[in-house]
Amino acid sequence: MRNPLEVEFLGVRFPNPVVTASGTFNYGKEYAHLYPLSRLGAITTKGTSPRPIPGAPPPRIAETEAGMLNAIGLENKGVDAYLKDELPWLKAQGARVIVNVFGESPAEFALVAGKVSPYADLVEVNLSCPNVHAGGLPYAHDPEAAADVIRAVKDATDRPVLAKLSPEGPTLKVAEAAEHAGADGFSLINTIRGMRIDLETKRPVLGHKTGGLSGPVIKPIAVRLVWELYQNTDKPILGMGGIRTVEDALEFALAGARMVAIGTATFADPYAPIKLVQGLEAFFKDRGDTWLDWVGGAQVR
Ligand SMILES: Cc1cc2nc3c(=O)[nH]c(=O)nc-3n(C[C@H](O)[C@H](O)[C@H](O)COP(=O)(O)O)c2cc1C
């Protein structure tokens, strides 16, 4: 019997469409004692840069109604540490790996992408990170700057490249520019900037003052953007934003997501990714159709 959840995505075969979202699963080690990482479709690793970054001051996370704010400040150990300690270990688990990369310039993105390529099934390019050469405005706000990054990464790696899109800025224009520059597929959405202020201290709750909003509260925005992008491109889409349940995942599939990532839900329940795999397995058992039959199936009158 065929596995109804199997997905081919940019030439890579995944046993199911469930992926962990970058920055919400580290490099997987903390979860490997809970379930085999190879049971998930893929692990997307924490954003990785050429050099270590200490990150933002605490507090870094705050709860909100139906979501979460985070300002981690792109903290990571730097690519060389992950090449030594984490990526070989993760591949040895039998997991499929999407490596999320970023840098301060197109050349820095390319450097990281080139180094991680032997371990990456796909490379995901975080276009939401600040472009230090444009006053810190994220690449995602400037289609030409985003295209420069994608071009540099494509030159540096033989792995398929996903442009990770932000819901802020001209998302579809950035997607179009990224596609012209050679992006093989897309992942979306990243977080949306938000803020909380403490009534006692009258100070921002987060150390960084503002942070990225994620979780169920952003899901309708994500579904809308996946759906709009699906009308505009033939490239495959990895959808995310507030996914927790089987119904959430199917909604993204109908909008056009060929694979789906689960992020914030893992903070509330570390079993959330494996539960989503199991839930989808149960849903498609004995139905006769498959996950791929749902992809892009939204009916628009
Ligand atoms: C704590 C945290 C850290 C994140 N770090 C990254 C990152 O390093 N790179 C990136 O591209 N996205 C990062 N994201 C965004 C997620 O990968 C995802 O796009 C977003 O949270 C929406 O999905 P969700 O609502 O399921 O969390 C981060 C999100 C959270 C909550």
Image: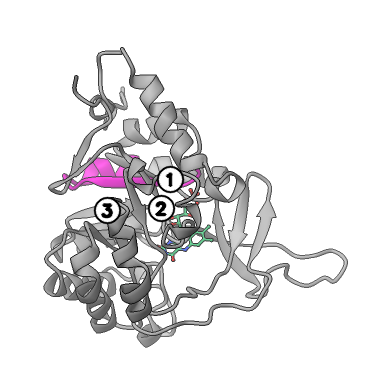
Identify the secondary structure beneath mark 2: loop
Q: Residues within 10 Å of mark 2 (few under 14, many from 20)?
A: many
- The answer to whether residue 121 shows anywhere in this view is yes
Q: Which residue is mark 1?
A: 222
Is 23 rendered above or below residue 209?
A: above
In the rendered image, which quarter contains the C terminus? top left
Q: Which residue occupies 36% across, 53% down?
A: 43
Crowding around mark 3 (Cα neighbors within 10 Å: few <14, some 14 to 19, many 20+) is: many
For disc 3, does the CB lie below 8 Å from ligand 1?
no
Q: Amino acid at mark 3?
A: Phe
| Magenta-tinted stretch | 227-243
CA separation, marks 3 and 1?
Answer: 13 Å
The amino acid marked with disc number 2 is Ile
Q: Is residue 164 visible?
A: no
Q: Earlier in the sequence, mark 3 or mark 1?
A: 3
Element on which disc 3 rests = strand
What x and y, as percent, mark residue 13?
Answer: 18, 43
- Local crowd size for mark 1, using a 10 Å CA cut-off: few (<14), some (14–19), many (≥20): many
At horizontal 33% and vertical 20% (from top left) the residue drawn is 284
Pointer 2 residue Cβ closer than 8 Å to ligand 1: yes
Q: Earlier in the sequence, mark 2 or mark 1?
A: 2
Q: Residue at x 46, y 45 (%)?
A: 221
Q: Which residue is mark 3?
A: 186
The residue labelled by disc 2 is 189
Q: Examine the rendered structure and indicate whether residue 12 appears above or below residue 168.
A: above
Amino acid type, residue under disc 1 in the picture? Ala
Q: CA distance from mark 2 to mark 3?
A: 9 Å
Q: Is residue 8 above or below residue 46?
A: above
User: Residue furthest toward the right?
Assistant: 200
